[in-house]
Amino acid sequence: MAKAVKIISLFLILFFYLNVSFPNLKHERELFLKYNFIDSALPSQFIKPLSLEFEGLCSDFLLFKFMTFLGGRVEDMKKNNSKYPKYIFSALDTITDLDPYYWDAYYFAQMFLAFNNDPEGANTLLEKARKYRTDDYRPPYYIGFNYFYFLKDFKKGSQYLMKASRLPGSRYYFANLAARLAVYSFQHRDGIIFLEEMLKETTDKRAKKEFQLRITTLEILENLENKVSEYHKLFDIYPVSLKELVKNGLIDKIPDDPYGGKFIIMQNGRVYTTSDMVMKRKKK
Amino acid sequence: MNKITALAVLTFKEGIRDRALAGIFIIALIMLFATILFTGLFGHELGKVLVDLNLSTIAFAGLLLTFFVNINLMAKDIDKRTIYCVLSKPISRTQYILGKYLGLMLIVFVALFFLLVFSAGIMYFVKSLYANIYFKDFSWSCYFQAYLYEMLMFAVLNSVVIFFSSISSSSFLTLLFSLATYITGQTIEEVMEFFKKETLGKQMSEMNQWIVDIAQYVFPNFSAFDIKTLASHGKLMPFSHTAALLSYSVVYTILLLFLASLIFNKREIN
């Protein structure tokens, strides 16, 4: 009996201690991971031989690690932190070396690199996708989009979109888009069409929300620019501010920027937003 | 022939009595069930992840079987001196080697076949959970082809095990040699590519060239049997490729078994 009591009390003491130490450990690990998380990827020259015959499995694991790493850092990434695009590129490069057909990885390249000031990096990876996924219209479509939207190279943009429009599964408007691009400069409508395409593909709720927000903003921008050119037709000058559009009854009120910024008119009559389509933190 | 079959069946029966086999089988089953959970964590190409996970589990179980069950089975005969009982019967040492090899292959084949059936069931279940759009590149024939290639790989690997068991009396050394051969076989193509790229434009030293050429002939090219990544993207290999690998596997296996029996015939068993 006494022995049983001893064992139970010892167990209880240990259990109590575990309860005390576990939150401590959790706290310490959180601190450790916050400052020491390895945001680097081993180059494929090492990973490939190391993974033996499990290259596909390794690519899945690395992509999973990549997703969990970025999951909590999407907000930080927008703060012009130059370290992240570098990590994103090297991680995705390694993953696509292990499995060069892996569309998820290329999709992330477009989502995180192109939309975070590194369209060239995204295009480098997407070129790899083009080499392997020869029947897939998406790689040339994304490259083309990056050329005209981010790099303002309309000629190359239209060339890639043309290539995309010839591949199976491509949408009917690709060819039109490519043709128009060769002639006109960028219009917001093209961005909206592209984002709607991306929206259809994603199952990620966060990404869906982000795309939806961007589409809404682009639609507002498009609408405002149309009104500005209407104003230009009427008065032969560009309005100095959006208030003039309200004054002249072209719009009811200045719309709110979903990202929390303000819409302004530039001298060339184009409308921009002060938020730069990055979510402004609400003041507490 | 009857003697060889009898020995193979005997080896198989001894193998399935091994508790390690049951352990490996249970671990593999748990891993297969875990794929149901893991597949859902990915965004688009669920089919690719599903095939990757299932094929990798089967390959991993096969490796564990070969390295831990089969090597022990070979060593046990000599350790426990049961080999005397066998060799005192009218059975030649070559027949012994062949019988043992067939027995080991039977263990791997039966165990992996059961895992294949389970994994096919699990994949069928996972496929029914999600929309078809996530399984655009999925193909059952690719999946079974990758499994067939994996079996061809195990045919060679088990002959490697037999070969090293015929040389060394310690199971640990056999494990070490077989593992080293497996790793070399999996990476040798990469190393060759690396050498070619590194020496591009430069004259490769004669010594290096010599070593590279010899190594390519001596070590089995296991990475050629790995088409898991392609299978996961629904890329079926042409028949000529399958035929080439089949003949490579058969020739290499026969060669190793022949060498093993030569050595084993000369060996003193104390």
Image: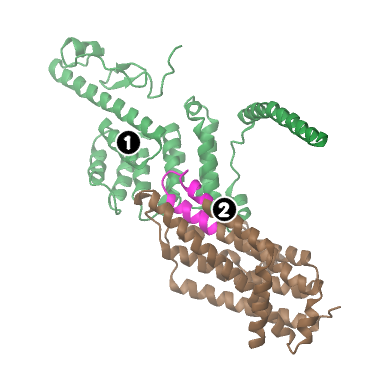
Looking at numbered disc 1 in the image, what kind of residue is underneath it?
A: Leu
**Colour in which the image shows chain A:** green
Q: Which residues are magenta?
A: B34-56
* Above or below: residue A187 compared with residue A99: above
Residue A134 visible in image: yes
> Tag 1, which chain?
A
Q: Position of residue B144 (x, y in %)?
A: 47, 66
**Image point (14%, 15%), residue name:** A235
Query: Which quadrant holds the N terminus of chain B?
Result: bottom right
Report how far apart the C-alphas of labels 2 and 1 lie in the structure: 41 Å
Neighbours of disc 1 within 10 Å: few (<14), some (14-19), many (20+): some
Q: Is residue A224 left or right of residue A40?
A: left
Please give the letter of the chain rendered in brown: B
Tell me the residue that label 1 is attached to: A195
Residue extending farthest to the bottom is B90
> Which disc number belongs to residue B30?
2
